[in-house]
Image (cartoon, helix red, strand yellow):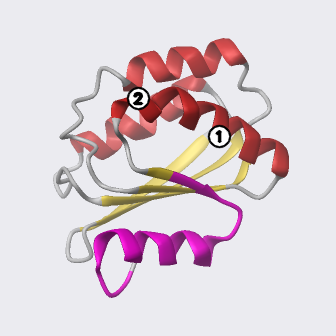
Amino acid sequence: MEWSVDIDPEAALVRIRAWGAARLEGFVGYAREVQEHPAWQPGMAILVDLQDLDLTPMKADDINRLVAIQKTYSKDAVSGPIATVVSRLVDFGIVRMWEAHVSSTGRNHRVFTDLDEARAWLLQQTGRSRP
């Protein structure tokens, strides 16, 4: 799994793009990269583009481990809206399973199959003019 992280401080937006075959270490790696980035600020909107990532290698145990790791993050650290975009129905289901597990953390997250819809939702959530 490979990824790129772009943070636009003026738009208060984090863009994460991942591709290849999903791995737990990849999700942990890009989260760490975001949190260690000098432009990162809690409350930023996050757009996660997984359209070119195959999530099927992620098994239920991997998702449970990812959820356990993410629950250790401060709620304030990840307080902005998060939109995840996938291209396949199976990946949509996997992200929804993750979403169900982390819903108790109070994170504002939605999964989409259309990048423009995800951007529009982030705009609605933040009241900003551009994602």
Q: Distance between the residues labelled 1 and 2?
A: 14 Å
Q: Mark 2 points at which residue?
A: 104
Image location (x, y in percent) of residue 47: 46, 60
Q: Residue 96 carries which label?
A: 1
- Quadrant position of residue 17: bottom right
Image location (x, y in percent) of residue 120: 50, 78
**Residue found 36% across the figure and 68% down from its top:** 125
Q: SS of the residue at dot 1?
A: helix
The residue closer to the viewer here, 46 or 111, is 111
Give the amino acid at mark 2. Ser
- Quadrant position of residue 71: top left
**Residue found 39% across the figure and 50% down from its top:** 108
Q: SS of the residue at dot 2?
A: helix
Q: In this view, does 63 lie to the left or right of 45?
A: right
Image location (x, y in percent) of residue 20: 72, 43
Q: Is residue 50 left or right of residue 39?
A: right
* Badge 1 density bin: few <14, some 14–19, many ≥20, Cα 10 Å: some
Residue 12, compared with residue 129, is above or below; it is above
| Region of the chain picked out in magenta, as a range | 110-130
Image location (x, y in percent) of residue 130: 37, 84
Membership of 4 in magenta stretch: no
Mark yes or no: residue 49 visible.
no
- Quadrant position of residue 60: top right
